[in-house]
Every structure is written in structure tokens, then in C-alpha cells.
Image: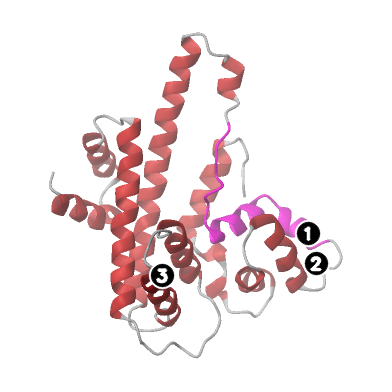
Amino acid sequence: MTQIELNEFYDEYMYLSIFLRTKKIYELTNNLDLFLLKALKIDFNKHYLQKALQLAKELDGHVPSQNTEYDEIAFRARDFLASSIREMDKNELKIVNQSIDGILSTENYELVEMIFEGMADFLYDIDELIRYKENINKTIDVAQGENENEAQDELIDYSESNNVSKIIFLQKLGLIEYMRSLSPFNTTINSLANALSGVTGIKPSTIQPMLNAMLSKGTSEKNNPLKSIKTVNVVINKLANIGFKAE
């Protein structure tokens, strides 16, 4: 497969059936070779990073909307860019950060949404296949004499979850609802955002709009992370993998 054909597969991924998606990944990774699975994930991230960067460059200088509220897609865009472009030229990074802020309420909204929503299906599927393959390897190790109890009680690393996912994790675990029953969090959302910033490593200014949309009646729903159905389902599935049934 050429790089052009691989890029076409990435771009069309969200429109393919689960069968065709899985079949193609099996073919590309030599029947789920773990090294190739991880390499495919990295290559996919780079592909979408280039799409985001190109879009940001094209929109450089665009006048941003007067609406200062953050958008859920902006959170995901920032998270993805921040985690993927650590070695990018600083000037290019500045272009990305400035441009993403200004494009969400324009005619380019659907294009930005497609870029970052398009990642969700692939990254969820590839992470599940990586976990499946790792579990198979651990089962083989157990058969060869590894401690069976240790293998069954495995540690699953979800530390790289993006900001929106982290807030959904807290909500699905009931921690936000519990904290809202305590003082001073029962009277001010800002104090709750400040506390959660210490737990999650997310800036309070990023958490506050999400909490406000989730907890305050009559507030615009566009910043509500629970409205991102795909991300919510990914979090619910991840919690199910560790034995927690989220509502």
C-alpha cells in the first residue's frame, strides 16, 4: 500500500463499516502485530495533525468570533495538538493556537469537526485492538508460568485521556456530583474548577465552561462535554474494561 492509499484509508475511516475497518487494520498490521499496531496509531496521528496544521495555516489571520465561550471541539483540538506537536517549530505552534480559537463559529466549523471527530473512531478502535493483543500476550505469558492473578488484575493506563474525557470520567464516576454536595463547591462552580484543576492538571479556565454547561440550568449546552456522544461512549467503554458500570 502506498502512502497515498494509506492517507485515503485514514480519511475514509469514519465512513467504513466496522467489518471493513477491522479487516483493513488486520491486513496493515500483519494480523495485529503489536509493534505495527502502535506504529499505525502514530502514523494516523501524524496524518490528522498535518490536516489540522494545514487548516490552521489557511485560516491564519481570520477574525475570531466575539463569542468568548470555549467550544467542546476546541478542547479536543487543543488536547490533540498539544500532545502531538511537541517538536513542532514554535512559530507553527503559535499559528495553530491562534487559528483554532477563531474558526469554530465560522463556515469552517463542520470541517474542523470532521477532522477531530474523524479521529475518535479510529483511536478508539486501535486502542481496543492494542489492548486485545496485549491481553493475548499476557495470557500466553501466564501459560508459560507468569502469575495468573497478576495478569487478571492488569493495570490499564488512561493517563493520556484528553481534557473532555477527563471531565466525563469524573462525572461518570460520580465524583463531580459528590463534590457538589460539599462546601464551597455547592455554592460556586469556580471553586470546583479550581479543585479539579489540581486533580486533572487542566487549567481552571478550561474546566469552568464545561462545568458551567453541565451544572447550571439555562446555560448554553455547546460547551457541555456530555453532548459529545462518541467521547462519552469511549469513556463508558473504558470504565467497563476495569469493571465499573457507568450510567
Q: Tag on residue 179?
A: 1
The residues colored magenta run 155-181
Q: Is residue 53 above or below residue 65?
A: above
Residue 90 numbered mark, or none: 3
Residue 137 higher or lower than 48, as above or below = above
Residue located 72% across and 54% down the image: 175
Q: Identity of the amino acid at label 2? A: Phe
Residue 185 occupies quadrant: bottom right
The reply, left or right, for residue 185 in relation to residue 130 is: right
Q: State if disc 1 and disc 2 touch (CB < 8 Å).
A: yes
Instruction: Report x, y in % for residue 91.
Output: 38, 74
Whole-number angstrom distance, CA of label 2 to CA of label 1:
6 Å
Q: CA distance from mark 3 to mark 1?
A: 39 Å
Name the quarter where the N terminus is drawn: top left
Q: Secondary structure at mark 3?
A: helix
Amino acid under disc 3: Lys
Q: What kind of element bears circle 1?
A: helix
Q: Which residue is mark 2?
A: 185
Circle 1 packing at 10 Å, graded few (<14), some (14-19), many (20+), is some
Asked whether, in this view, residue 7 is left or right of residue 236, the answer is left
What is the three-letter code of the residue carrying label 1?
A: Met
* Residue at 27% from the left image edge and 44% from the top image edge: 21
On the image, the x and y values in percent for residue 198 come to 71, 59
Separation of marks 2 and 3 at Cα, in angstroms: 38 Å
Sequence-wise, the earlier of marks 2 and 1 is: 1
The mark closer to the camera, 3 or 1, is 3
* Front: mark 2 or 3: 3
